[in-house]
Amino acid sequence: MRASSLLIDALAMACGVAAAGCSATTTDYASCDLNSQCRDRFGFGWVCADSGFCEAAPRLNRCASSFPEDLFFDPQEHTDTVVFGNIMDRSLATHRAREKAARLAIKQADDEGGLSLRDFGSVFCTIEEDPEFDQLTRPEAAVAVADYLVNTLGVPAVIGPAASDDVNTVFNQINGAGAEALFISPSATSPALTALDPATVDDDHPGLFWRTAPPDSLQGAAIAYDMREPGAGRPQKVSNVAVIYQTGSYGEALSAVFSQEFQKAGGDLPTLFSYETDGQRSEAIGQVAMGSFEEVLFVSSQTQQVIEFLDAAATLTGYDGMGIFLSDAAANQDLTMQADPTRFPQVRGTRQAPLDSDQDLVYAAFLAAYSSEYGEDARKFSFTANSYDAAWLLVYGSAWGLLQDGSISGMNIAKGLRRVSSGDTIGILPTTWNQVREKFQRGESINVEGASGHLDYDPVTEETSGKIETWQIVSGQIVGIDTWPPGQ
């Protein structure tokens, strides 16, 4: 596939026309038919232009960050570098932390010797709505950067997007148009996303969508259980619930699972309020305030919308004394730092239960490495451990693809991910990378223990599972108070 005719010579711009350190210039033309031919000859970031000659790919300002930093500017040093993509919303501190966690994993794999004389790298892209970038909406930006990563730069796999609706849009747009890139999300939890892959998968025909967080079929049941089983600070059962949910794969699926589980547990049929626009959300918030509900469940995949919900609820007396339940998208520092705290004492929520760093070596090692690298506590942000695991899984999948199939592609990485849930138990640690390579060289499967927990993927659904934690906001911090399923 050839690149857009609007090509920019990134090397010349970065190094200067006469700079001695530039290993390729616009005079190094070669005829081509495919972008891959240009990458093989000149290195990462080169494409086949509409002219039929190799040129440096245009730089996308949303994808200005990379590891290593010279990935674009010294392409011949990265002819064999295994490069992944990363899609987050860098306007959110939580997403920046997830990006850092993935970068840490790629750096560790690189420091431990890479893969068969190949280094690892990553291009980091952001999708927030910002006129300094362009006029794109967030979903449009997600598709644009995914297209750039997969079809222009040729990355075989992408970490992200983070939100379920963005994943659904991007996967269908990119792979639906014929690409075979693997997408692995650390935080997209909608059960509807399972259907992105074929109904039948096996070791030779794996799916191309993966995640390191359990689907919301578990979270919906945990929310219903919490409301119907008093305990851990809840004095009585809740029977009358309103659900305000964002239309799309995340909101619709989670609200449906919750409604079914809530009725199974003896609750009344929840009153549902869906929204697509800001105006519809405001109207739904007002309608709930005028009702007589014991609790409201607010479901959105975007933290900013949860913040805006709490800000609005703070001004409406109808929410006085009403329980407020939030989902995993809200369990992060962006919410506690930016939302009006008036309703914080009324808030409960769910998220994937984090591990105990005093008991789990892999999680403790991740926290220590993250703190050493960035000087902050990864526990303040949601799904950082999941993002770290996602990056390492791409490294593992690449090893399987290269060692067993002789090439690294989205499909071959996916084949490798079907080899991480049985066999000898190996923790995701830098020091075990050589052991993983040796196992895969012999064609053996491994059973990985991640920083986010057990990554035992079901061979039929290719989904993982885990415990769900109920949380509250105490002194401006997210604090876990209970886990589901009970007794585990």
Image (cartoon, helix red, strand yellow):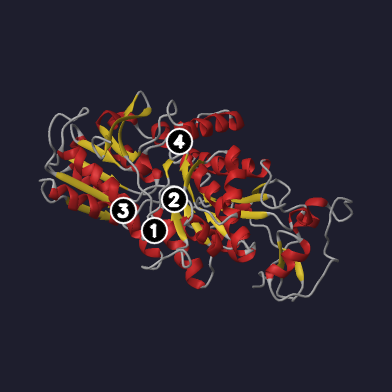
Residue 242 versus residue 401 in the image, above or below:
above
Q: Disc 1 marks which residue?
A: 459
Ranked by sequence position, the earlier of labels 4 and 3 is: 3
Q: Is residue 161 visible?
A: no
Amino acid, disc 2: Ser
Q: Position of residue 284 (x, y in %)?
A: 24, 50
Ranked by sequence position, the earlier of labels 3 and 2 is: 3
Q: Whole-Å distance between the Cαs marked 2 and 4?
A: 27 Å
Q: Whole-Å distance between the Cαs marked 1 and 2?
A: 9 Å
Amino acid, disc 4: Phe
**Which numbered circle lies on residue 381?**
4
On the rendered structure, is 397 left or right of 23?
left
Q: Residues within 10 Å of mark 3 (few under 14, many from 20)?
A: many
**Which numbered circle lies on residue 89?**
none
**SS of the residue at dot 3?**
helix
Ranked by sequence position, the earlier of labels 1 and 2 is: 2
- Quadrant of residue 23 within the rendered picture: bottom right
**SS of the residue at dot 1?**
loop
Say if mark 1 contacts mark 2, CB within 8 Å. Answer: yes
